[in-house]
Image (cartoon, helix red, strand yellow):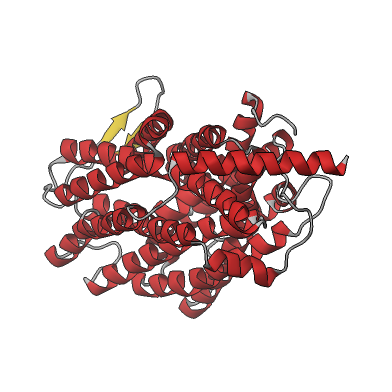
Amino acid sequence: MISDRLRLKEKIGYGFGDLASSMFWKIFGMYLLFFYTDIFGLPAAAVGTMFLITRIWDTLFDPVVGVLSDRTRSRWGKFRPYLLWFALPFGLIGTLMFVTPSFGSTGKLVYAYLTYSLMMMVYSMINVPYASLLGVMSSEVKERNILSSYRMVFAFIGSFISLILIEPLVEFFTGITGSVQLGWTYGVMVIAIMCVLFFLGCFGLTKERVKPISEAQDSLKDDIKDLFRNRPWWILLGAGIAALIFNSIRDGAAVYYFKYYVAETGNFKLPFLSASLTITTFYLVLGQAFNIVGIIFVTPLSNRFGKKNVYLGAMVLATFLSIVFYFLGSNSVVWILILQCLISLCAGSIFPLLWSMYADISDFSEWKTGRRATGLIFSSSSMSQKFGWTLGGALTGWLLGYYGFQANVEQTAGVQTGIRLMLSIFPAVGTLLSVIFISMYPLSEKTMGKITAELNEKRMQNNLTSK
């Protein structure tokens, strides 16, 4: 077998893929609802319904992409080709989402449905194979933990970059064009070009190594049966959906929280640049920075205490801190930022663990059944991500509508209370559900050590037999 030890260049290359994905993902999570209501001109409740309808379809589309990638045969492997084929469509359609056409309200809603649905499908076509790539770059559990941490560090770097750039870019292009709508279009276009380049870098720097025990193509029916009988998969699916509900509600409501509730409106000067950030951007960027801190610490902590225990500790703490967040007043800016740091620290630590555990589940399934369906299993990670984001995004739009939100006007006390709940109590429900699910996860480090050893032995035997 080829050595499963990965060079630094390849780890960085793999990180490029999530850096690209996250640059758009963070803009979608933080600004898309705001763009649709305050710039594009759609009602919040209508956007919430659109998120639900389009994302349910897109969530169901993810396993289809997993099945397709599992059955792909090319000189570049099963999963890497999709990075090459869909990088440009990813950037192009992502930009079109932020174009404001000169249509009436119905025409705008139809345009939003079409472009958003297409973007989520393209996102699946590139992100499901990218996630699956983690399962075939190395068979070593600790190496996967490191690779997953690289991925998440680069993901949050991408989020950090997009949050730093998007508002200045929009302001810059708005000044040039005299139109805030065009400011958003051109600002997102700059981000899109960067995404395309990073995806191509990921394709060029990575390599697929892990081969299945059997090269015979399994039937789709058998793959699906194996998946549905995989108890750890169901547990991780529930934990991932709950964690994304927590994350997406907090992300989606943050801009509204500062625009319509927090009294402080000053800017933060950057010490080494002749620029400043609004408090909203500073809050979001601070969150990304502490997400990265959480990722840096999660690998040594999980190697010592186990992935399950670290995940549980992080989610329990996030639940408590989210509840405390509700009691902060509009003038408590310092405490708002402190709690943002601590909650983001917890959130950053869990996502590398989720990706690494999906790779473990792929090995567990092959060990138990003799069949490997990496793409199908990893598509469930993307599926849970999108479904959690779907529920969180839809709930955010519906709750704004329920509490009586109207864009670009002073909000009533009831609306402000609803926005506060979306930054605190509602996310805490998501973290608590995630704790319940992950407490039942059965694949310990000891168990995975045994599974990995047995799988490697079988692969070596098959290699010797085939020679």
In screen coordinates, is 417 left or right of 280?
A: left
Residue furthest to the bottom: 106
Quadrant, the N terminus: top right
- Residue at image x 62%, y 24%? 8
Residues 300 and 191: in front is 300
In the displayed structure, 228 sits above or below 301; it is: below
Residue furthest to the top: 272
Q: How many marks?
A: 0
Residues 232 and 434: in front is 232
In the displayed structure, 119 sits above or below 136; it is: below
In the displayed structure, 41 sits above or below 454; it is: below
Residues 42 and 30: in front is 30
In screen coordinates, is 166 left or right of 72?
A: left
In screen coordinates, is 133 left or right of 116?
A: right
- Residue at image x 41%, y 28%? 300
Q: Point out residue 261 in the picture as x, y percentages from the top left corner.
A: 19, 53
The answer to whether residue 440 of the structure is visible from this angle is yes
In the displayed structure, 141 sits above or below 89; it is: above
Q: Point out residue 417 in the picture as x, y percentages from the top left corner.
A: 15, 61
Q: Point out residue 80 in the picture as x, y percentages from the top left corner.
A: 72, 46
Residue furthest to the right: 467
Quadrant, the C terminus: top right
- Residue at image x 53%, y 60%? 380
The answer to whether residue 176 of the structure is visible from this angle is no
In screen coordinates, is 53 left or right of 222?
A: left
Q: Point out residue 290 in the picture as x, y percentages from the top left corner.
A: 34, 34
Quadrant location of residue 19? top right
Quadrant location of residue 365? bottom right
Residues 209 and 369: in front is 369
